């Protein structure tokens, strides 16, 4: 194995190509402030006690068809009062973590972990088994590979509270494997307020360090392209013609190649000192009386962040892990991420009748520039490969929803909701260039000591990819509740969702024959200049496959009935059943008029029962037991055999049209002791049996091309237990000093132990994407009996140790998170599994209320993230050797922000 190249060495090698960079890139101020702050009133920033009051009195969790009042009694603690097993992150909890997005806050919840940039795993089950809702309504995803939305898209500034329910109830959708995460946006403010926030952060591996960028367009800093990256008209016309690229005239292909943007999307430039991260936010709201008993509120938020991340990554692959890596690359990539979001909410209360209209806009743009150098023994032995990548990824989510709560009589109430959401992802001009240095003596190879690109896929390559995704989701639901008596409530409901997605991906490679050696040594924009394309007859080849475009749809009709009753004093039963009918289809569009249209459909209906029994043994002490059946459907992109590059893992994925639904049987027992307001000690055990779980597996070719796909394993089981504790210790008795009189120590911790295993027996079969005809492959060819589910960590630990002032805002918190190693994918060809080692992360967050001149109240926040300098490691291990699929330093991040309230 060759010695890994340092960042400095790679930057030097990148200058070996002919001609210097033609244009200068002006550094732009960038960054992120570590999270905006929820609204406060003009009377001042809230103390820890006031935030706790808000948590216990006004946390709106928007549970469709659910009542969080335990029959016959009220309690300020929502987790205690809820009829199911729930965890609630209030505004106070979110602020304490100091996270900038809701995914970061959720990783502090018992049994939850966050993987691959915002996907939440509940009790070791992957994101496919989690359900994300916004105010009780479903959300579309802007990710091609996912149907679930990445929660790092949601800034904490737009979220009032988050509910995590781990035991299924019939009022929620049936795709409820690990749990549901319901995000609730801010509602009517109690009084008018206006907040302005600004902040900055720096990372030890990125800020002020060497990195890469490319010009793109003059408006890239806004997160919006100025039209530079629009798909050229010649390419649009060629795609719309229905003619395969292989049948087009070579002159027409040259014309298309010359129509592409060149140097501004293909020249990677070195930035000697990357800027710090930056963010700004504006939040405001007001409320006023309407008529004699009405009140209307308006709330609006807007924020902008610009942040940078450089990763110096070791990437390897192996056909035999015990023998070491056969592919070794060191890649340095710089991502510039710009996020713009806004929320507009209007609420109306007319006596007991409530209406809420919420509009959410989120746009997240990633600009990527990367260089990599290394060896690949599966191609030219002893040769060095220099790879250059540039890309621009736009993710956008628009959501509008209307929710109504109507009290028809003292006993009868009706909740209604309807919404429309649209998500988009555009990735124009994904460009890759591969240069090769054979390292052969120049007497044998005249250019053996130089990097060349012959544009023939043997000694160099260049490609350009355009992809686009659009998804529309319509949803509606109604819940009718009737209180038969103070101890018995009956509820019935209906829900409908209709999701439609269109996704396209066109991958084109440049093609040349007998390109002169001096031309092969040119840098990318000179190599593909109009002169080079015309004079040396450089054409295009399409590598998109037969079906570069597909449509997908999922329509679900559901109805449910449930009851909640206190059957005897202190014993409450919540039971119900849900009927759910789903029609899911994926269609490859016949854009080239072949006469064949691949079509995959899953039409299933299910009866999904659920029951939870709660026993109040003593004041503050209760026990729960629950059982249910739920499902998990394949995600759209998992159902069609079309390649997709995941930039987070630097790995190609390919779908499988033969996937089936998974069915889960769930059981929970739990003991809860609520010692006082916001103080608790809980213990729980859980068990799940999964039929046909969908697992990822990896294949690798002789040239070390790695592809990850999906298949149904025969069966799996998962079990474990959770412990959670939250306690406040007043310090007023420790000393007569005024410093201690209003302060307390906050101790919050949780631990989750999970075990899972696949069950693969003789005679079990599965269907991979590569299956054509004949006998079904044995499941043991892809899965090993007894191995854990992908994504499951044996141990999850979260600890928070804080010092808080109960009279005014002053809060200092240490946060520790630990996750033991987890499998990210089955190993290729039954080799050892590919594992990630999340390890231990230590953060510190301080929040301090400050009165500015003129009596203006403000909040100052300081954050230190990843203090111990944890690395990211994803690897295979066998025979004392480790093969790292990805290994890089994350770095320590220091952030500071100031929010001013008017």
Image (tube, rainbow, N blue to C red):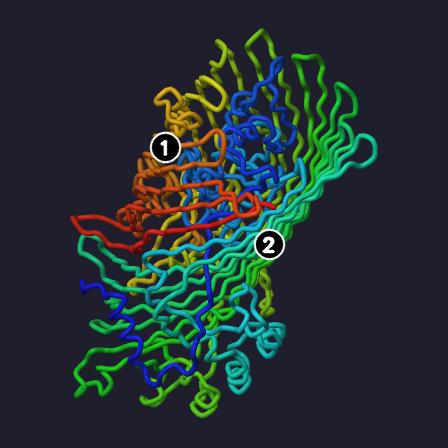
Earlier sequence position, callout 1 versus callout 2 = 2
Residue 671 shows in the view: yes
Q: Residues within 10 Å of mark 1 (few under 14, many from 20)?
A: some
Q: Quadrant of the N terminus?
A: bottom left
Classify mark 2: helix, strand or loop.
Answer: strand
Foreground label between 1 and 2: 1
Q: CA distance from mark 1 to mark 2?
A: 39 Å
Q: Residue furthest front?
A: 854
886 relative to 405 in the view: left or right: left
* Residue at image mark 1: 801
| Residue 792 higher or lower than 330, as above or below | above
Q: Which residue is mark 2?
A: 423
The residue depicted at 45 percent of the width and 34 percent of the height is: 691
Count of numbered labels shown in the rendering: 2
At 44% across and 20% down in the image, what residue appears? 670
- Badge 1 marks a residue whose secondary structure is strand
Coordinates of residue 175 in the picture (x, y in percent): 54, 37
- Residue 647 lies, with reference to residue 514, above or below; the image says above
**Where does residue 612 sit, x and y in percent of width and height?**
53, 20
């Amino acid at each position: 194995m060759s010695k890994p190249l340092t960042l400095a060495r790679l930057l030097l090698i990148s200058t070996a190509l002919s001609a210097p960079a033609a244009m200068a890139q002006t550094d732009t101020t960038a960054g992120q402030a570590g999270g905006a702050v929820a609204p406060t009133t003009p009377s001042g920033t809230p103390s820890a006690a006031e935030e706790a009051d808000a948590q216990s009195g006004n946390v709106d969790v928007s549970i469709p068809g659910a009542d969080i009042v335990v029959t016959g009694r009220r309690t300020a603690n929502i987790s205690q009062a809820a009829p199911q097993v729930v965890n609630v992150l209030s505004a106070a909890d979110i602020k304490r973590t100091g996270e900038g997005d809701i995914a970061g806050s959720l990783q502090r919840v018992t049994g939850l972990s966050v993987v691959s940039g915002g996907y939440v795993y509940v009790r070791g089950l992957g994101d496919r088994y989690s359900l994300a809702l916004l105010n009780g309504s479903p959300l579309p995803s802007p990710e091609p590979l996912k149907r679930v939305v990445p929660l790092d898209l949601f800034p904490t500034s737009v979220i009032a509270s988050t509910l995590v329910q781990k035991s299924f109830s019939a009022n929620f959708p049936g795709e409820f494997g690990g749990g549901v995460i319901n995000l609730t946006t801010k509602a009517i403010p109690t009084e008018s307020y206006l907040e302005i926030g600004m902040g900055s952060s720096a990372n030890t591996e990125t800020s002020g360090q060497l990195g890469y960028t490319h010009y793109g367009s003059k408006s890239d800093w806004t997160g919006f392209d100025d039209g530079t990256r629009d798909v050229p008209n010649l390419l649009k016309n060629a795609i719309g013609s229905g003619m395969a690229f292989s049948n087009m005239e070579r002159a027409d292909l040259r014309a298309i190649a010359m129509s592409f943007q060149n140097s501004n999307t293909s020249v990677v430039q070195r930035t000697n000192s990357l800027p710090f991260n930056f963010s700004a936010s504006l939040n405001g709201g007001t409320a006023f009386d309407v008529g004699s008993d009405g009140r209307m509120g308006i709330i609006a938020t807007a924020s902008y962040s610009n942040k940078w991340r450089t990763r110096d990554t070791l990437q390897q692959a192996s056909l035999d892990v015990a023998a070491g890596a056969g592919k070794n690359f060191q890649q340095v990539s710089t991502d510039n991420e710009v996020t713009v979001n806004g929320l507009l909410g209007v609420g109306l209360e007319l006596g007991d009748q409530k209406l809420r209209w919420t509009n959410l806009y989120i746009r997240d743009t990633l600009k990527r520039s990367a260089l990599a150098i290394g060896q690949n023994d599966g191609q030219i032995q002893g040769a060095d490969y220099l790879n250059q990548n540039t890309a621009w990824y736009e993710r956008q989510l628009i959501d509008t929803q209307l929710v109504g709560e109507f009290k028809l009589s003292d006993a009868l109430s009706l909740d209604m909701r309807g919404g429309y959401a649209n998500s988009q992802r555009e990735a124009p001009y994904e460009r890759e260039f591969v240069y090769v240095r054979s390292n052969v003596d120049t007497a044998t190879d005249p250019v053996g000591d130089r990097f060349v690109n012959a544009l023939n896929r043997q000694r160099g390559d260049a490609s350009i990819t355009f992809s686009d995704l659009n998804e529309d989701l319509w949803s509606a639901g109604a819940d009718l509740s009737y209180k038969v008596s103070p101890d018995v409530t009956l509820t019935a409901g209906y829900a409908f969702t209709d999701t439609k997605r269109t996704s396209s991906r066109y991958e084109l490679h440049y093609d040349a024959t007998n390109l002169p050696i001096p031309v092969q040594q040119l840098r990318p924009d000179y190599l593909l200049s109009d002169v080079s394309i015309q004079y040396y007859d450089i054409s295009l080849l399409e590598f998109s496959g037969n079906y570069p475009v597909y449509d997908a749809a999922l329509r679900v009709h559901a109805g449910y009935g449930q009851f909640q009753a206190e059957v005897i004093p202190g014993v409450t039963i919540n039971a119900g059943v849900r009927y759910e009918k789903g029609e899911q289809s994926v269609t490859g569009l016949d854009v080239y008029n072949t006469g064949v249209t691949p079509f995959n459909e899953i039409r299933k209906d299910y009866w999904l029962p659920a029951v939870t029994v709660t026993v109040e043994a003593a004041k503050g002490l209760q026990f729960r037991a629950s059982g249910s059946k739920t499902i998990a459907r394949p995600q759209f992109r998992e159902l069609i055999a079309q390649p997709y590059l995941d930039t987070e893992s630097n790995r190609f994925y390919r779908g499988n049209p033969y996937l089936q639904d998974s069915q889960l049987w769930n059981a929970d027992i739990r003991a809860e002791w609520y010692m006082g307001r916001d103080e608790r000690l809980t213990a729980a055990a859980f068990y799940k049996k999964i039929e046909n779980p969908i697992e990822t597996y990896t294949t690798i070719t002789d040239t070390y091309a790695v592809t990850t796909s999906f298949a149904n394993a025969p069966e799996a089981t998962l079990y474990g237990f959770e412990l959670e504790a939250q306690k406040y210790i007043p310090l007023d008795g420790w000393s007569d000093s005024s410093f201690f009189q209003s302060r307390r120590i906050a101790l919050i911790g949780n631990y989750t132990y999970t075990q899972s295993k696949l069950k693969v027996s003789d005679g079990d079969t599965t269907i991979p994407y590569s299956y054509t005809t004949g006998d079904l492959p044995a499941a043991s060819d892809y899965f090993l009996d007894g191995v854990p589910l992908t994504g499951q960590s044996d141990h999850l630990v979260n600890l928070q140790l804080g010092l808080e002032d109960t009279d005014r805002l002053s809060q200092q918190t240490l946060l520790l998170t630990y996750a033991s190693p987890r499998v990210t994918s089955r190993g290729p060809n039954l080799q050892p599994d590919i594992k990630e080692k999340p390890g231990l992360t230590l953060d510190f967050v301080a929040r301090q209320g400050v009165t500015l001149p003129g009596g203006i109240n403000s909040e100052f926040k300081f954050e230190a993230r990843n203090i111990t300098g944890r690395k990211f490691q994803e690897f295979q291990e066998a025979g004392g050797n480790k093969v790292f699929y990805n290994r890089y330093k994350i770095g320590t991040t220091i952030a500071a922000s100031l929010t001013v309230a008017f």
